[in-house]
Image (spheres, rainbow, N blue to C red):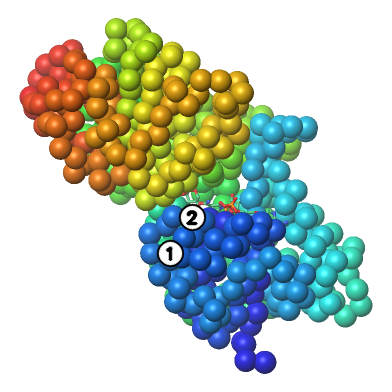
Amino acid sequence: DQWDLKILCMGAGYVGGPTMAVIAKMCPKVRVVVGDISQKQIDAWNTDVLPIYEPGLLDCVKESRGRNLFFSTDLDKEIDEADVIFISVNTPTKTQGIGAGAAANIKNCELCARHIAKIATSSKIVVEKSTVPVRTAEAIARILAANEKSDVTFQVLSNPEFLAEGTAMTDLMNPDRVLIGGPQTPAGLAAIETVAKVYATWIPRAQILTTNLWSSELSKLVANAFLAQRVSSINSISALCEATGADVSEISRAVGMDDRIGKRFLQPSVGFGGSCFQKDILNLVYLCETYGLQPCADYWRQVIQMNDFQKKRFSEKIVSSMFNTVTGKKITVLGYAFKADTGDVRETPAMFIVRDLLQENAKIHVYDPQVTREEMWLEMNYTCGVNHETNPRLDEHVVTATDPYEACKGSHAICIMTEWAEFKTYDYQKIYDAMEKPAFLFDGRLHLDHKALREIGFEVHAIGKPDPVKFPGSTIA
Ligand code: NAD
Ligand code: UDX
């Protein structure tokens, strides 16, 4: 037929959608189908209101959709037709049973493997794109092998994804590396080459790294653990800065200029969020425990404990600064997504601050340019168990605003929770004039111009920054 290769991706989420859109764009002779069990998800991919917000994604999808990029729920048909099947389904932390709260739930990956085994009438390369515990490929390969029909064979590879949300398209177009792990056998190496060739269409060979299966699976967990560790490290120092008059931004700069340390991922914050960091570290912690390596498990768990401390510390700072009570006070939360340029709210630090303020009976108004109220409550219920049944007056206590000025009007405090660029462009004099006094501003992202805000009259508290009253001379007044 007309195609060089036929690819199916099972899972049309934050990873499957953008990754396949880029492959389709760069390889017009490869037929790419993104499949999902959710009809709603697939229907959205087939419109111009995609199920996820990611800068540049819509244009990329539109370029290939209907040409060599298709979105479908007909998984039976597409499994049978595909040469290469990526598994890009969600692998969340288990919420019950053995390893609850730490182990990754790989049920969806196993279901995909069983689905493939049941349907396939020709040989396939099956590629783990999902982030999984090391040695998951062994389970997938065994399930596939146990169901092999004559003349049908399977090669299982690992090709973890390193894209970050908000920059997914540029990360995919220009990745630091592509990692492909596989069995070091003739058939395994040939399968690796088939997948490597796809990426080599636009990525230099030197950046396509091939390893054995287990190194590839484990590298993904290690990369996320290292990145999160840097954030927790600088956040731990931010607490010490607030106590001593040192300035955490100056420290990030001074430390990051050492080439051995590097500048990136030293931005202090109210804590890291997102669907990956905590889940993948917990996954690593659980693996260490499973292999009897308790000191290694404890070492990595500390990265999460520091993150929890940072979020808690921020809520406590708000309450203690505002005369130890926020009961009945309007508090404005600007930004709810876990980082800028995404609508994703999974594990967003803003959620924990809202939960804490809710417990203090504050009246919270949230404004975020991309987050819908529905997604906010879904995640709040899933992660914090806060819902309309546990909190009958939830709608009264947490209002979502569509206009930032309206959200700030009559408010006692503003909390910056996400580093959206538009927050820098607001008229803070106008906002200040319409607020209760003293007007507090808590900057959880070191995003705004604190000097200018103080000149207007705001009382500014920012992560890791010296308080000019407590430490005169530590900052230019
Ligand atoms: P997601 O929740 O956005 O999407 C997963 C999709 O898989 C959902 O649409 C779901 O309906 C579908 N699905 C579940 N079971 C299925 C099945 N049996 N058959 C077909 N479809 C099925 O998840 P995501 O954020 O895209 O993450 C996917 C994987 O990639 C995870 O393992 C994650 O850890 C990893 N990852 C995520 C990111 C990220 O930034 N989000 C980055 C790198 C790696
Ligand atoms: C992360 C990894 O970066 C990516 O490689 C992997 O594929 C998926 O997980 P993501 O979670 O999308 O990506 O975003 P990332 O930019 O890593 O940020 C994660 C969290 O850390 C965000 O809440 C962000 O605000 C926070 N962060 C990041 C900081 O607080 N400080 C920093 O210096 C960097």
Question: Residue 378, image x and y in percent?
Answer: 56, 37
The residue drawn where x is 33% and y is 15% is: 329
Q: Secondary structure at mark 2?
A: loop
Between residue 299 and residue 120, name the one nearer to us: 120
Q: In the rendered view, does 245 fall on the left or right side of 106?
A: left
The residue drawn where x is 72% and y is 48% is: 106
The verdict on label 2 being within 8 Å of ligand 1 is yes
Q: In the rendered view, does 336 fall on the left or right side of 66?
A: left
Residue beneath disc 2: 52
Residue type (three-letter) at the residue carrying disc 1 = Leu
Residue beneath disc 1: 57
Placement of 260 over or under 453, stated as above or below = below
Question: Residue 258, image x and y in percent?
Answer: 28, 44
Q: Are marks 1 and 2 in contact (CB under 8 Å)?
A: yes
As drawn, the label of residue 431 is none
Placement of 375 over or under 245, stated as above or below = below
Identify the image quadrant of residue 326: top left
Alpha-carbon distance for marks 1 and 2?
Answer: 9 Å
Q: Is residue 36 visible?
A: yes
> Which mark sits nearer the N-terminus, 1 or 2?
2
Q: Is residue 260 visible?
A: no
Between residue 171 and residue 326, name the one nearer to us: 326
Question: Residue 13, image x and y in percent?
Answer: 57, 56
Q: Secondary structure at mark 1?
A: helix
The residue drawn where x is 55% and y is 86% is: 29
